[in-house]
Image (cartoon, rainbow, N blue to C red):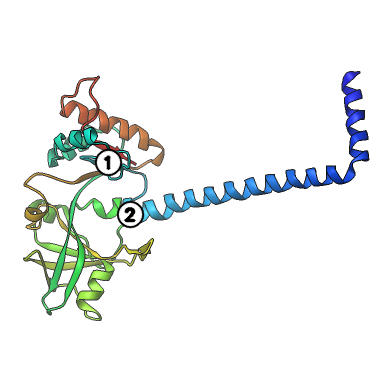
Amino acid sequence: MQVWEAVILAMQQLRSEKLKSFFSLIGVILGVMFLIVVVTIIEGLDRYVREEVTSQVFGVSTVTLRRWPEVDINTDEERWRRRMRAPRLRYEDAEAIRARLTIPARIAIQSSSGGTAVADNGRTATGVQLIGASPEVFPVRNLKIDRGRAFTEQEAAAGTPVLVLGFETSEVLFEDLDPIGHTVRLRGFPYRVIGVLEERGSLFGMSLDNFAVAPHQSPIQAVLNPPGIVDEVIIQTVNPDRLLEAQMEAEGIMRTRRLLRPSEPNNFALET
């Protein structure tokens, strides 16, 4: 009985204060609409980051092993010192993950540094990202060939000085010429151009096409890192739903290799 009395009282109140009730209803509707708009915008940004930023820069369904996190705004002095003491990643770390990971995945390695590329026609490209990588980096990072080809496993293992140019780097060095077969010097080392990548455009005003990719064991390795050292190991699972499993397995493999006790924190970073 009390419920019905409350309903009747509410209806009487609405009839007696129609204008106030109307504005209250409008306020509720506007609030709900605003919330829907905000959620839609956030979902759109999340989709953009996942589909555009991630696929263009890091690749889809990947987890990256690094010496330390690429971005960390909360680094204090003690954490910084601990990172500096962390062992550098080695080629053998990638091989161990490749051998022991049970989740079907591609394993790519890469190291990089900035530099200048000089073509045999005298033209120069500056601010080029020089990348030494394994052949798996092309599918893992979604780098698609526009002309020529990517380097092979055999060329990577032999350290053959062959080179795949980013679209912008190719345009700066060769303009309307076909770059395939030409020589480009990276840090003084001569490389034969075998491929050019499709244009990827820019991201937040930064070009995604000013780089060059060479086999990680080719001469450029001498200026990227000491022998056997790599900057990143990238893991791309065949099934995106198993990425977290792969990350956990890779973490266990690295902790075992580093002889870390259960109470000790990771002295490496795994980032998706």
Q: Amino acid at mark 2?
A: Val
Q: Residue at x 69, y 45 (%)?
A: 31
N-terminal of the pair, mark 2 or mark 1, is 2
Residue at 20% of width from left, 53% of height from top? Answer: 135
Residue nearest the observer in this picture, 225 or 146:
225
- Looking at the rendered image, the quarter that the N terminus falls into is top right
Mark 1 is surrounded, within 10 Å at the Cα level, by few (under 14), some (14 to 19) or many (20 or more) other residues, namely few
Tag 2 residue: 57
Question: Mark 1 belongs to which amino acid?
Answer: Pro
Question: Does residue 132 appear left or right of residue 219 in this picture?
Answer: right
Estimate how packed mark 2 is, as few (under 14), some (14 to 19) or many (20 or more) residues with alpha carbons within 10 Å.
some
Quarter of the image containing the C terminus? top left
Please state which of residues 132 and 137 is positioned toward the viewer in this rendering. Answer: 132
Residue 233 higher or lower than 138, as above or below = above
Q: In the image, is residue 209 above or below residue 21?
A: below
Question: In this rendering, would 194 be left or right of 219?
Answer: right
Q: In terms of secondary structure, where does tag 2 sit?
A: helix
Residue 57 picture location, percent across and down: 33, 54
Query: Residue 158 at what x, y percent from top left?
Result: 7, 53
Please tell me how many numbered marks the rendered image carries.
2
Q: CA distance from mark 2 to mark 1?
A: 16 Å
Residue bearing the label numbered 1: 69
Q: How far across and down, in percent of the image, does residue 249 sit? A: 28, 30
Q: Position of residue 22 (x, y in %)?
A: 83, 46
Q: Is 229 or 11 nearer to us in this picture?
A: 11
